[in-house]
Image (cartoon, rainbow, N blue to C red):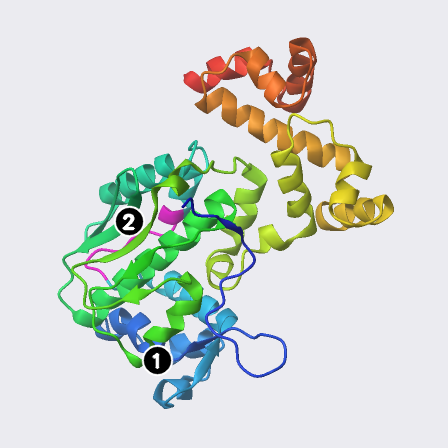
Amino acid sequence: MRAIAKPIDHLPLRSQGNGPARSIIDAGYLNLVLSGVRQGGYDIEAIVARAGIDPKILATPNSRLSQQQFARLISHLTRVTRDEAWALGRRPIKPGTFRTMCKLLVRCSNLREALRTGCHFYHLVVDDFTLRFQADSQEACVWINDDIADKDRQRMINGAAIFFVYGLMCWLVGRKLPLTTVHYKFPQLPLSSELEPVYEAPILHDQPRTELRFEASLLDLPIIPDEERLGRFLASVPSVLLVRYRDETSFSERVRGILRRNLTKVLSLEDVAEKLNVSPQTLRRRLQDDNNCGFQELKDRVRRDVAIHLLQKSRLSLEEIGMSLGFSEVSTFHRAFKRWTGHAPGEYRQIAKT
C-alpha cells in the first residue's frame, strides 16, 4: 500500500497535563548533548545558564525542558564551540555547513535526489560519521556510519543525525513523512520513549546500525522550490526542527500550497478563499498581515519559483513549462517571466547552465 504523507503541523516530543499541549523534553538529554563540551573542558554551568536554563536542572532527576529552551541551548552550543556537532566529534563541523547543504537540496527535483546529494555533501565535509542512503522498489533507508569511540558522544551523534535528517526530509517536501521503523544501535534508555511521538513509528534498539526506514514511493515526492521559504527556514534553525514547522502552519503558506497544487488552473482570490473557508476580505487581510503582499503578488512568486526550478532542473520546453504554470500562450509566459526576473526564460536557462 502506498504511504500517505501528511501535511506538517509540528513534531511534539511529549504533552503534559489536560490543558493545551506543551512540548517538553527530558533534561536527561542534556548529559548526552553536553558530553563533548564537558570532555573539552568548557564551563558547563555557564553554557546552560547563558541559554536561559537553570544549571540546577542538570542534577535534578526527571526534570523537563521546553523545546524552546532546548533549541536555545543548541544554538548557543554551536556559537560557543564554533561546531555544528557541538564538540562531539574529532573535528568541528564549521557553522554554515548545514545552511550550505540546504541551499543545494532545495534545488533538487525530488526527495531521492536530495538524499543522494545530502549524503554525498556530508561525506565530503565530515570526518567522524557518514550518512548513507539506498532504496529498492519497496523500501528506502537512510543510516549513519561512525567511528566515534566514546559511547555518549556516539549515541548523541547517531540520534541527532537521524533526527535532523528526518526533520529536513519532511521540510523539503512540505509533509510529515510516514516511517516504517526507526533503528538504533544502542540499548534502550528510560528517556528513549521521548522520541516515539516524533517519528510515529516503531523504534527498535540494539540494532546493527542507526537508520530510518520508509516506503520507497516517498522518494518521488517533489522538493518545494521556494527560496523565500528556505530563507525563513534557515533563519529559524534549529527551532524550526525542534519546535514546529512554522512555514506550513502560517496562513500564507497554506495559500502557497493551494496555488502550487493548482498551477494549471487560473485560481482567483475568491476561489482560494472558498478552499480555505474564509471570506475574500479575510484572505486579503491575512496575506497582508503575513507577507505584506497581495494575492496576485504571492501567486506570481509561486509561479516564478516553480518556473525557475523547471528551467534549471527539467528538460521541458519553454512552451511546456508555460502550460504547466497555467499560461495559455508561450508569449504570455515570456513576458511574465521577464517581469519577474529581468530575463527571458530561454536566456535564464542558458545562464543557469554556465
In this rendering, position of residue 149 left or right of residue 46: left
Inspect the image, locate mark 2, and give the three-letter code of the amino acid beneath it.
Val
The image shows residue 15 at horizontal and vertical percentages of 52, 76
248 is higher (above) or lower (below) than 88: above
Residue on which disc 1 sits? 28
Residue on which disc 2 sits? 142
Q: Magenta stretch?
A: 89-98
Q: Earlier in the sequence, mark 1 or mark 2?
A: 1
Please name whichever residue, 264 or 161, is drawn nearer the observer in this view of the structure.
Answer: 264
Q: Residues within 10 Å of mark 1 (few under 14, many from 20)?
A: some
Q: How many marks?
A: 2
The image shows residue 237 at horizontal and vertical percentages of 48, 56
Please indicate, yes or no, whether residue 222 appears anywhere in the rendered image: yes
Residue drawn at 60 percent across, 13 percent down: 344
Tell me which secondary structure the magenta stretch mostly adopts. loop
The image shows residue 153 at horizontal and vertical percentages of 22, 67
In this rendering, position of residue 231 left or right of residue 75: right
Q: Is residue 219 magenta?
A: no
Q: Is residue 91 magenta?
A: yes
Q: SS for tag 1?
A: loop
